[in-house]
Amino acid sequence: MFDALGDKLQGILGGLRSRGRLDEETISKAMREIRLALLEADVNLDVVKEFTAAVKERALGQEVTKSLTPGQEVVKIVHEELTEIMGSADSRLAFSGRPPTVILLAGLQGSGKTTAAAKLALMLRKDGKSPALVAADLQRPAAISQLEQLGKQIQIPVYSSERSDAVKAANLGLAQARSQGRDVVIVDSAGRLQIDEELMEELEHVHRAVKPHNVLLVLDSMTGQQAVDVALAFQERIAFDGVLLTKLDGDARGGAALSVRAVTGKPIKLASVGEKLDQFEVFHPDRMASRILGMGDVLTLIEKAEAVATEDEQKEMEARMMAGEMNFDDFLASYRMMRKMGSMKSLIGMLPGVGQQLKDVDVDEREMARVEAIILSMTPRERKLPHVIDGSRRQRIAKGSGTSVQQVNQLLNARKQMQKMMKQLSKGKMPALPGMAGPR
Amino acid sequence: MARSWSELLGDEREVAEPEAERRRFLGRLRSSLGRTRNAIRLPLGRFDPRDDESWEALEEALISADVGMAATDELVERLRRRRDFDDLGEALVEEIVAMLGEPGTLAVNGRPSIVLVVGVNGTGKTTTVGKLAHRLSAHGRSVLVAAADTFRAAADEQLEIWSQRAGADFVGSTKGADPAAVAFDAVSAAQSRGRDVVIVDTAGRLHTQTNLMDELRKVRRVIADRLEGAPHETLLVLDATTGQNGLQQARLFGEAVDVTGVALTKLDGTAKGGIVLPIAVELGLPVKLIGVGETLEDLQPFDPADFAHALVGSDAE
């Protein structure tokens, strides 16, 4: 399922290379695939419609840059728009100038509030705060006990003396935190359905009582089309400031996050990413965008390729290669271009489909580093005119780069081979590669 | 209307269920799916089978109910083949019933019968175990529940409270204990005490966590080794608010522990519940139980016809 969208788009748009601009028909085709991908990721239908319309408008007439295929170009636009929607608001928590800062967690049953409360407390303590937890879930059997046990595990105080009235429990907990000099108080409320009038009213009362500086809606990343209804209903009652996305370590694409962001305008602030209490992090909108699209990290690859290879650089090098020139300056330049894209291993990992199969293949990064060291140990003159490198120079280069003369020789031979190839190419001796050869 | 527990359990002697209770259940189901139903029926009002936009509107309504793309395509294809569009709403009900398949049964007539309950975190496993225990007690089974969720803090306390409400025996555990050992003890205890049904609650786990899925495999294996033919039922508890990931959950839990049926929970908000269609169509997995509320009585046998009616049927009944 993952990466399917990327492949499909490449298929649809692949033949388009010769044309310079994206036209309406092509984009419409692409948008149908994107619509499907977003729906399969559980993005709300209305949000999908609005989104594809916006992307279409932007993509129309867009010039396709040289380094990308039209398919990649469209994906890039979609990705940028997605990231824009998900990340353009401040995702930090608000801290009160007069502590304690109060954080209220609310959400449906089973979304993961209690666990998230403990995880958040642990994260804040690592940031130098002294947090406390307040048990205000008096509905679910043993919810208080669960929070108490979690608190004990991470050695963070849990206030839970009141057991029958949620508003009292919250108030009392807050007072205790204040008297013990705690600077952040996290209130864990009961899970409730957004249409449960009684419990929603209780939540309003808790909200009014503790006057939270941050209200977070805890949302299960596996939620379907209902996410929007839930978010709007909670927003109406307690005007939450942001979303805490849970169970993100599963394989859900998490379209619910996008829907909620788009409909309420509230940012996703935090994400819970594992069973362990420290598996909790600040939300990364760009990663989420790729995930919803189901594109692996192919997007990252696109961006990196774009960033490193400016057109001029490419042209210059092409011209030199055509002329059959391949000195060590060229060698180093092309080599560094690759290095800029990341380690060989991470590059392989980013290729959709390939990454999984090759994740255990050992690419010798040190070998690559050695090549660079050897070239850097040459004088500029040696790099430009490799034929001047004699025996004593080889010894000096080997010493300077911490390698052996043998290894230096290997590299010298490699360059010679490549130059030979280039020369043959430029003389048109390789008809198997039409378009590249031919006398000029 | 409504499938009775006696039917679900295959009991010859019907245990009377208060008519009021059944009606209340159907009412809750219909009201939960009300918004979804209205959204799906809206495009039916001015439906023109020759008009692509009509079909598209119907598709979109189904997708908005979490039916997913593949099952929506299948459903629409079935409708198109009918060529008779006089009562599209009724046609839709019929096709959904056909796709959902025969109503399931719960195989709990061996003594003891073992029911293993699995699912991702927060779907309502423990609550479902409590309600199921209550129902089985009411239908003449002596029940023992086992807290094999040894991971989540206070999970065993929660289950113990439920078991008291349901009048069932309780086999507890300590946090961090081996869940397979808890299951083993529970089966042994049921045998020596002559209990009819053992319901084993397990820790919630994401289907992508391979080590936790291995742990679950072990629980199942140990139960199977202890008692031939067990577990007799392995129920996947699925949150009705789940989107397309539900299919993946059903697939991976199915591969790991041979799931025999789904218990659909939390169908008491404005949940869509459409995910049961792709699960039935693509995996052939029947929904056996459905939960529409918080009380002990709110767990009911799943009836495909009732569900289809509540999802797309007309209100005039």
Image (cartoon, coloured by chain):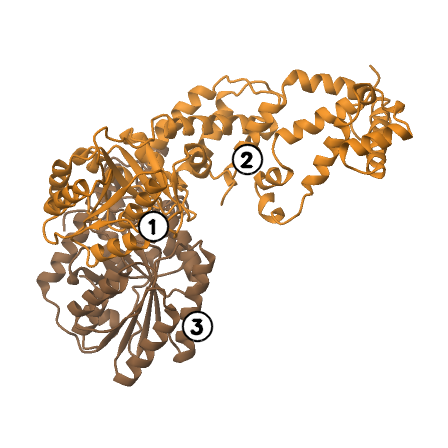
Rendered shade, chain A: orange
Between marks 1 and 2 in the image, the one whose residue lies nearer the viewer: 2
Ranked by sequence position, the earlier of labels 3 and 1 is 3
Q: Residue A214, how many percent across, how many down?
A: 24, 34
Rendered shade, chain B: brown
Tell me the chain of label 3. Answer: B
Q: Residue at x 51, y 25 (%)?
A: A26
| Residue identified by numbered label 1 | B275
Q: Residue A422, how many percent across, how many down?
A: 82, 26
As shown in the figure, which amino acid type bears the numbered disc 1?
Ile
| Residue identified by numbered label 3 | B221
Please tell me which residue lies in front, B140 or A322: A322
In screen coordinates, is A428 left or right of B248? right
Q: Secondary structure at mark 3?
A: helix
- The verdict on a common chain for dots 3 and 1 is yes
| Residue identified by numbered label 2 | A298
- Label 3 – label 2 distance at C-alpha: 41 Å
**Quadrant, the N terminus of chain B:** bottom left
Residues under numbered marks 3 and 2 in contact, where contact means CB atoms less than 8 Å apart: no
Q: Residue B144, how many percent across, how many down?
A: 25, 74
- Mark 1, Cα crowd under 10 Å, few <14 / some 14-19 / many 20+, is many
- Label 3 – label 1 distance at C-alpha: 29 Å
Please tell me which residue lies in front, B29 or A406: A406
- The verdict on a common chain for dots 3 and 2 is no
The quarter holding residue A68 reads top right
Q: Please, which residue is most extreme toward the front here?
A: A180
Q: Secondary structure at mark 1?
A: loop
Please tell me which residue lies in front, A83 or A53: A83
